[in-house]
Image: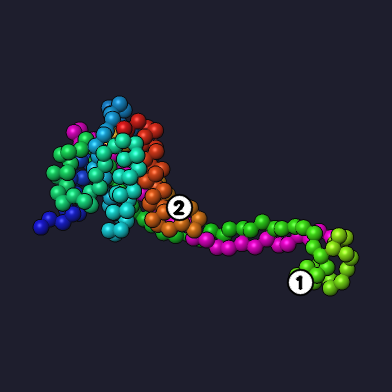
Amino acid sequence: MRTRAFIFGTLIAGLSACATSPDTPAAGSPAHDDSRYSQVLIYAEAPDREWRESLETSLVRELSDTGVTAIPAFTMSDGMAAAEDVDAVIVIAVSETGVREQWIEQPAMSGTLSSNSLAAIGGPASGPSPAQCKTRELAGAGFAAEVPWAVIAISVIDRETKETVWKSAAKFEGAVRSDFEDLRQDYARSVARKMNKDGLW
């Protein structure tokens, strides 16, 4: 039995034979600026099954909200047959992933402290009444937080002409203290909005 990678790899290789370099920022093919697509197949090339299925599912959900019929490739056993029913194929390629650490500063606090409060933080044990206490600034604290990131390229390939009509490649970062699932959902939401804004649907 042919594997998923072989089936869809053959399909994508055929469709992208005329495609331009994937490192070009988002750009449409001049010959297809007026193209509109209503049915698409989404295929993700990613580090593992979880990444593939999550990316495909997330983008399907976002495109469905715009009225596009989108099919995740992981649900199809035969990529060639699946491509017959769509007018475009979206290819997502994840080349790198990682996590960076970011220090989050907590703002310094200031306020009026009583003698007892001053003593508790190392101030004089005795002093003026609370109403007469001086304002003291407390040093701000902070914490280290993880930020997930991934280098992702995405292309929209016209099934009939086999030309790449839209593409983008970038290092995408998630929110502070988010995880990779959050990142994948945020990426799908962001790229779907961009595609819609650029008039693909």
Q: Considering the numbered disc 1 on the image, is that residue within a helix, a strand or a loop? A: helix
Q: Is residue 159 magenta?
A: yes
Which residue is denoted by mark 1 in the rendering? 120
* Image height of 138 relative to 55, above or below: below
Q: Considering the numbered disc 2 on the image, is that residue within a helix, a strand or a loop? A: loop
Which residue is denoted by mark 2 in the rendering? 174
* Image height of 22 relative to 198, above or below: below
Say whether residue 168 is visible.
no
What amino acid type is highlighted by mark number 1? Ala
Which residues, given as a range, are shown in magenta?
134-163
Q: Is residue 150 magenta?
A: yes
Say whether residue 40 is visible.
yes
What amino acid type is highlighted by mark number 2? Gly
Where residue 28 sits: x, y (%)?
A: 33, 33
In the image: residue 54, left or right of residue 182: left
Which image quadrant: the C terminus?
Answer: top left
| Of the two numbered discs 2 and 1 in the rendering, the one whose residue sits closer to the viewer | 1
Where residue 142 sits: x, y (%)?
A: 61, 62
Q: Considering only order in the chain, which callout, 1 or 2, is on the residue closer to the N terminus?
A: 1
In the image: residue 61, left or right of residue 135: left
Circle 1 crowding by C-alpha within 10 Å: few under 14, some 14–19, many from 20: few
Where residue 62 sits: x, y (%)?
A: 35, 43
For the residues labelled 2 and 1, the Cα–Cα distance comes to: 40 Å
Tell which of 86 and 100 is nearer to you: 86
| Residue at point 10%, 57% (across, down) | 1
Where residue 61 sits: x, y (%)?
A: 33, 45
